[in-house]
């Protein structure tokens, strides 16, 4: 039976385990397809991103793992590339790494009001700092800027996989800053789903936040699922695993959540293309 995750981390960025430990755990858990996608270097957030001086080491290490695991599991050398609004991937040295990769995950973790850089996929305190210093307390403006940045990333990067499409809601689960179902949010959900479909891209179900922060942070949200389903967007599993235990903790739950949302088919990546498989064959 196929089993796959196309969004996973190691200690080259903010993961806990080595590449060898992650792939050993993946093999033991029965994975047939797996992508290493550590966070690309950021000159602003060096504490949770990969040192660009280790790019070659990272690629070579995964290439060795591929050879060691040949015939047992399909492995892809990838990166999670951050997009900076109006600056593309400027802060990451992406261009020097891209030719060496099999797979690119596109993500938005930061916002850039007035060209200052703030992390929005972090603690509540970091979120508050961005809100008050960057947007003068206007949470609607901050949310809109996130979705505009995500739309720009879709068009500008066109990655193999789109990560945690509505991660902006992580610190807004109970609507404490803005209304998660406000008309402008609903419009952005629709625009994003339509853009993903227009470029024939793939997005993920990602329970990494749910696991790491012990709350109901699944990406996409149920409301976003509805828009993705309407547009017949291709879905896959990206566990966003940061440790070996995350490879077994919620894979089945991810499939069940996709089925509950109404998806009948999901997609897996193999040798440069996304292939469909009926969801009920995996559950």
Image (cartoon, grey):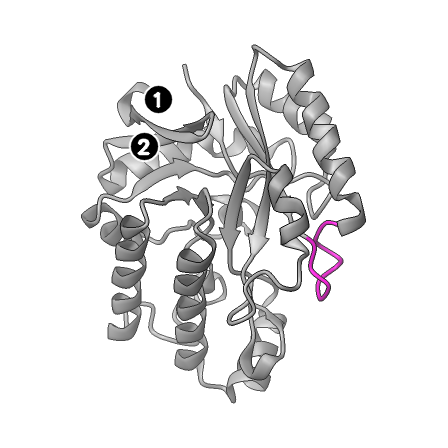
Check disc 2: other Cα within 10 Å, few if <14, some if 14-19, many if 20+: many
The residue tagged with tag 2: helix, strand or loop? strand
- Residue 185: % across, % down: 31, 69
Q: Residue at the right extreme?
A: 53
Q: CA distance from mark 1 to mark 2?
A: 10 Å
Mark toward the start of the polypeptide (1 vs 2): 2
Which residue is disc 2 drawn over?
266
Residue at image position (49%, 32%) is 5
**Residue 32 to residue 54: above or below:** above
Residue drawn at x 57%, y 77% as measured from the top left: 130
- Residue 49: say if magenta: yes
Look at the picture and state if 63 lies above or below 212.
above
Farthest bottom residue in view:
136
Q: Please indicate, yes or no, whether residue 253 appears anywhere in the rendered image.
A: yes
Q: Which mark is residue 282?
A: 1
Residues at discs 1 and 2 in contact (Cβ within 8 Å): yes
For image coordinates 35% across by 21% down, the residue present is 282
Total numbered labels placed on residues in the image:
2
Q: Residue at x 50, y 65 (%)?
A: 171
The image shows residue 117 at horizontal and vertical percentages of 62, 74
**Most distant residue in the top direction:** 71
Q: Is residue 145 left or right of residue 96?
A: left
The image quarter in which residue 233 lies: top left
Tell me if residue 173 can be seen.
no
Q: Nearer the viewer, mark 1 or mark 2?
A: 2
Whether 30 is drawn above or below 42: the answer is above
Q: Give whichever of 73, 121 is nearer the camera.
A: 73
* Residue extent of the magenta highlight: 41-50
Circle 1: element type = loop
Q: Residues within 10 Å of mark 1 (few under 14, many from 20)?
A: few
The percent coordinates of residue 251 (x first, y second) are 46, 31
Main secondary-structure element of the magenta-colored stretch: loop
């Amino acid at each position: 039976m196929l089993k796959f995750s196309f969004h996973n981390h190691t200690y080259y960025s903010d993961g806990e385990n080595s590449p060898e430990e992650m792939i050993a755990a993946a093999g033991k858990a029965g994975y047939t397809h797996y992508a290493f996608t550590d966070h690309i270097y950021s000159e602003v957030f060096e504490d949770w991103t990969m040192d660009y001086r280790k790019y070659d080491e990272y690629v070579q290490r995964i290439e060795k793992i591929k050879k060691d695991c040949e015939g047992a599991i399909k492995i892809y050398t990838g990166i999670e590339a951050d997009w900076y609004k109006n600056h593309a991937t400027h802060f990451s040295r992406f261009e020097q790494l891209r030719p060496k990769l099999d797979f690119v995950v596109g993500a938005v973790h930061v916002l850039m009001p007035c060209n200052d850089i703030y992390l929005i996929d972090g603690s509540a305190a970091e979120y508050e700092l961005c809100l008050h210093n960057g947007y003068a307390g206007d949470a609607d403006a901050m949310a809109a800027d996130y979705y505009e940045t995500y739309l720009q990333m879709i068009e500008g990067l066109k990655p193999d996989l789109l990560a945690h499409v509505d991660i902006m809601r992580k610190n807004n689960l109970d609507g404490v800053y803005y209304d998660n179902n406000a008309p402008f949010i609903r419009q952005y959900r629709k625009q994003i789903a339509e853009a993903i479909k227009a470029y024939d891209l793939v997005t993920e179900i990602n329970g990494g936040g749910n696991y790491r922060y012990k709350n109901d942070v699944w990406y996409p949200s149920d409301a976003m699922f509805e828009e993705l389903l309407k547009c017949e967007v291709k879905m896959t599993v990206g566990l966003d695993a940061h440790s070996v235990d995350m490879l077994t903790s919620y894979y089945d739950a991810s499939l069940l959540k996709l089925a509950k949302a109404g998806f009948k088919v999901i997609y897996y990546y193999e040798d440069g293309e996304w292939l469909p498989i009926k969801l009920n064959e995996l559950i």
